[in-house]
Image (cartoon, rainbow, N blue to C red):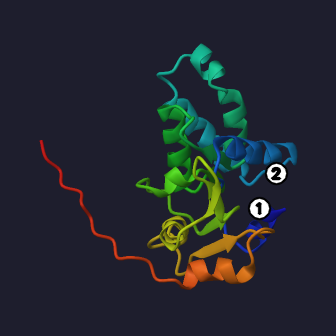
Amino acid sequence: DRVGLLGKRTWLPAMVFVFSRAGCDRAVQQLLSDGVRLTSDDERDQIRELSRQLTAGTSDEDLQALGFDWLSTALERGIAGHHAGMVPVLKELVELLFVRGLVKVCFATETLALGINMPARTVVLEQLEKWNGQQHELLTPGQFTQLTGRAGRRGLDTVGHAVVAYQRDVDFQTAASLVGRRVEPLRSSFAPTY
């Protein structure tokens, strides 16, 4: 169990990047099925209270339709998924709990690496190839850097860890080249206007 190994090494909280929404949900469900619990009783109480506060404006019927029972069970165990298929209030809840250190492992699509402040002690890449709509292609060095750049929490960690799961179809040299290759310099083109 990878999550157990990360816990033993004190490498939690961890962000695990999975390149599909369904894959994120399956990973959360697998940990629930395995009986994994990463939170203390006090943390579970804090999660319940924050969940109640953030979802107070959402009806019970809507929460049920959104699968909140399943999500809250996962959250209380310190496990979450985060992807574009979630409604904003539930994504906000996951983000808040992760930042506060109450969610210990979050399975997310790569869109999380863009612009959301959810730094982790450890980043895990389940795959180095992702579907581009036509075929599976290897991550670019820039994409790899963007994803693994979430490792290490400013002011809390002196070292961040990036873990790449074994890749049956990608040899070690190719995987290692993503780390060692220089990426093109970034030039911001963001110019806010009215």
Q: Position of residue 133 (x, y in %)?
A: 58, 47
Real-space Cα distance between discs 2 and 1? 9 Å
Q: Position of residue 112 (x, y in %)?
A: 51, 52
Mark sitting on residue 36: 2
- The residue drawn where x is 74% and y is 54% is 38
Q: Residue furthest right?
A: 34
Q: Position of residue 108 (x, y in %)?
A: 60, 51
State the SS at label 2: loop
Q: Earlier in the sequence, mark 2 or mark 1?
A: 1
Label 2 packing within 10 angstroms: few (<14), some (14-19), many (20+): some
Q: Quadrant of the C terminus?
A: top left
Mark sitting on residue 3: 1
- The residue drawn where x is 74% and y is 68% is 165
Mark sitting on residue 118: none
Q: Position of residue 119 (x, y in %)?
A: 50, 62
- The answer to whether marks 2 and 1 mark residues whose Cβ atoms lie closer than 8 Å is yes
- The residue drawn where x is 68% and y is 50% is 78
State the SS at label 1: helix
Using the rendered image of the protein, determine whether residue 150 is visible from the camera's viewpoint: yes
Q: Is residue 65 above or below residue 178?
A: above
Q: Quadrant of the N terminus?
A: bottom right
Q: Is residue 174 left or right of residue 178?
A: right
**Circle 1: residue type:** Val
Q: Is residue 185 above or below residue 52?
A: below
**Circle 2: residue type:** Val
Label 1 packing within 10 angstroms: few (<14), some (14-19), many (20+): some
